[in-house]
Amino acid sequence: MSDFAVEISHLTYRVKRAFALEDLSLRIPTGSIYGFLGPNGSGKTTTIRLVLGLLRPESGGITVLGHAIPAEAPAALAGVGYVPEAPHLDPTLTVSEAIWFHSHFYPTWDAAWAGRLVRDFELDPRRLFGKLSKGQKGKLMMLLALAQRPRLLVLDEPTDGLDPVVRRDMLSALLDYVSAHEATVFISSHLIHELERICDWVGVMDNGRLVADVEMERFKTGMKRLKVSKCPRDLTPLPFRVLTRTPLNGNGGETWLVRDWAPEMAAALTAAGGEIQEVIDLDLEEGFVELLRSFRTRRPEAADV
Amino acid sequence: MFERLDPRSPTPLYAQIAERLRAAIVTRELTPAEALPSVRQLAASLRVNPATVVQAYRELEAEGFIEMRQGAGTYVREVSPSQRGAERERQATELVRKLLTDAARLGLSVREVTAAVERELGEKVR
């Protein structure tokens, strides 16, 4: 088995002049739950559609479960469960008809699992898809993706706009499946705290570029806000990276946003002639927002990650 | 026992889960030989990554609080009085450290903090 369920290398994709993914490289470790963050229009859904072979890249390579996309898309997609942003089933099918229809595309279909989820999700098998509530539609889409017993789940904003009870049920079902089958998950969401709970890897998109691709724990422990009461003259010897600097109360103090921080690095700052007043922890949402802000205020060539 | 897990906290989720279980074992809310939920059950019910639960269980096993039997589940181990004492001492130290860190941030002196502690204790005793 490959170390990566999804590998994207030097991918370029353009929609006329309006939007482009430029030289995108991203790897999703097999068995991880990879959270895909980014503001609206940053290219998350486009990337997901490229991974599924629904769009054709201009250049670059995509591999999904060891198969080249789009050339070997059918072989790859046999092992991929997909929950799209907007549920798209025939509204005139009942729940059980939709399940029956879907099951025939997948030799790996797990009818017992599907039956259990119909009960857990309290779905009425005789109800028309078109008459389901938004939450019930979301649950049905999750059911269809899980019961085909995929090795990779691709979820594009699966819980967007759903109430907390439905979101809980859907995520519990997802995690139950992942525990039982050791599947890989590629999930995009605006609900950052939800991702913070479940993901062990995060990718952050901004304006068609991947600006962070890092283990969740490293992202969280490495992104800090530092209150520095005395700044060293030269920042280059510091073992961490200073993303932004803002003056603090006019006494020469500054607030820094830093990456790749570790507690023992305080000594290096002191050695360089600086002085730390306080180290402030950031949660994923704050880290994400600050990171994007720092990329928007800097020149693009400085924005390597 | 897992109320108020905080994914936003800088303390990793696995450490928070391990901490809750450790406390429950020391206070005998979980009794020796009691079975813990499977990784799958706990991950789904807490809505966390299964790897997070595994990491918490491994840490507790290394510390001797629980035993993971291959294919047969995870069980609470008998905790010796000295281990129990050490754990309670660690918890108390942790609380005091947190208090002192917060106090330093607020610029409170040790004297002010001790005075407040004595005042509160006095109220409790009375």
Image (cartoon, rainbow, N blue to C red):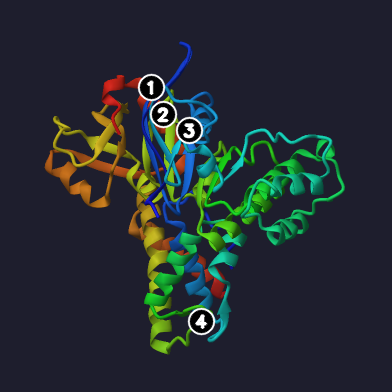
- Secondary structure beneath dot 1 equals helix
- Secondary structure beneath dot 4 equals strand
User: Which residue position is annotated with label 2?
Assistant: A292
- Does A134 sit above or below residue B70? above
Q: Are marks 1 and 4 on the same chain?
A: no
CA separation, marks 1 and 4? 51 Å
CA separation, marks 2 and 1? 6 Å
- Decide: few, some or many residues near mark 2? Use Cα within 10 Å; few <14, some 14-19, many ≥20: some
- Does B95 sit above or below residue A53? below
Q: Quadrant of the C terminus of chain B?
A: bottom right
- Identified at 38% across, 80% down, the residue is B86
CA separation, marks 3 and 1? 33 Å
CA separation, marks 2 and 4? 45 Å
The part of the image, by quadrant, that contains residue A270 is top left
- Secondary structure beneath dot 2 equals helix
User: Which residue position is annotated with label 1?
Assistant: A296
User: Which residue position is annotated with label 3?
Assistant: A70
Residue A228 coordinates in the image, percent (x, y): 26, 37
The chain holding disc 1 is: A
For badge 4, the amino acid type reads Val
Q: Are marks 2 and 3 on the same chain?
A: yes
The part of the image, by quadrant, that contains residue A114 is bottom right
